[in-house]
Image (tube, helix red, strand yellow):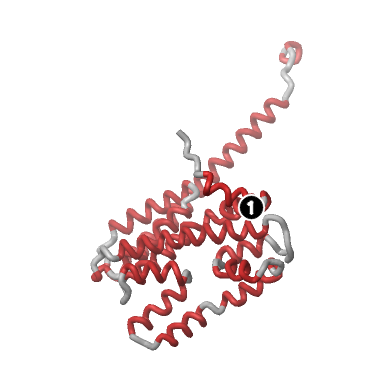
Amino acid sequence: MTFRPPQALLRPWHRIAPAERAGFIEGARYFAPSLPAVFSWGLVTGVAMSKSVMNVPEAIGMSLLVYAGSAQLSVLPLFAAGLPLWTVWLTAAIVNLRFVIFSAGLQPHFSYLPLWRRTLLGSFNGDLHFVYFMQRYATPGHEPGKEGYFWGMALTNFAMWQVSSIIGIVLASAFPDSWGLGLAGTLALIPVMVSTINSRSTMLAVAVASTLALLCFHLPYRLGLVAAVVGAIAAGMASDELAARATLRGIRRRKLEHAAAQVPPQSAEERS
């Protein structure tokens, strides 16, 4: 049994031009490899908000309304210190000044849009998908699929950020305060680490580093970390070397087989 979305949800999608729909899907797919990093950043931000002076509803409201990780983290100490609200607004504005530059970079691409659409588009702008968009579209002006491509990345980023941030807020409320942010940092690094495992040598390096870190955990001066890093580098280099030798042997074997196939068979007279 296949899931079919309700027609009420499909009608707005089908009203969009086909080029913009294709651009939206392309943008979402292109941004997908960056989702583990967004998840990690949102998770840490959510934990930090939940462990500050905010309660869970206030932290969730801030995540949904502010949607700016660096600004959210910057104003948390100000809230804790009880400083005036104008200092909070000024700090957030200074931290987010880079988005003024981002908006200036996007203006030549979407200047043909009405003001309310440009304002909405700028509200969902972000660091990663701004860079990806500028790499994809170097020429300003209208182009079919350009706006859809931006929204595909922007909404994918927004959805992952909110999900990860709310998970961090809810989970952190269940952790004792004595655990601090160390656990959050560890949890946030896990998806980033997993996303980098793309070969056998990397997998071996991770396995060796994890094993050595556990075995050498009680060494003084955090030498267990040094042992894990050195062991991971050695394991990765050894694995790459073995793989290169195996590849070289395979190339030589294929060359010999090809050379043998090119030699014509000798007749009986030539053999005698």
As drawn, is 85 to the left or to the right of 11?
left
Residue 119 horizontal/vertical position (percent): 60, 71
Q: Nearer the viewer, residue 173 or 254?
A: 173
Q: Residues within 10 Å of mark 1 (few under 14, many from 20)?
A: few
- The residue under the point 37% across, 52% down is 208
Q: Where in the figure is residue 52, as x and y percent of width and height?
A: 32, 75
Residue 221 location, quadrant:
bottom left
Q: Is residue 127 above or below residue 93?
A: above
Label total for image: 1
The residue located at (62%, 66%) in the rendering is 117
Frontmost residue, 243 versus 22: 22
Q: Could you tell me residue 226's position as x and y percent?
A: 37, 64
Residue 112 picture quarter: bottom right
Q: Is residue 144 left or right of residue 218?
A: right
Left or right: residue 207 versus residue 4 is left
Quarter of the picture holding the N terminus: top left
Local secondary structure at mark 1: loop
Direction front: furthest residue: 8
Q: Which residue is mark 1?
A: 16
Identify the residue at horizontal 61%, vertical 48% (top origin): 14
- For the C terminus, give its image quadrant: top right
Q: Residue at x 61, y 60 (%)?
A: 150
Residue type at tag 1: Ile
Quick check: 155 above or below 220? above
Position in image of residue 77 (x %, y %): 37, 81
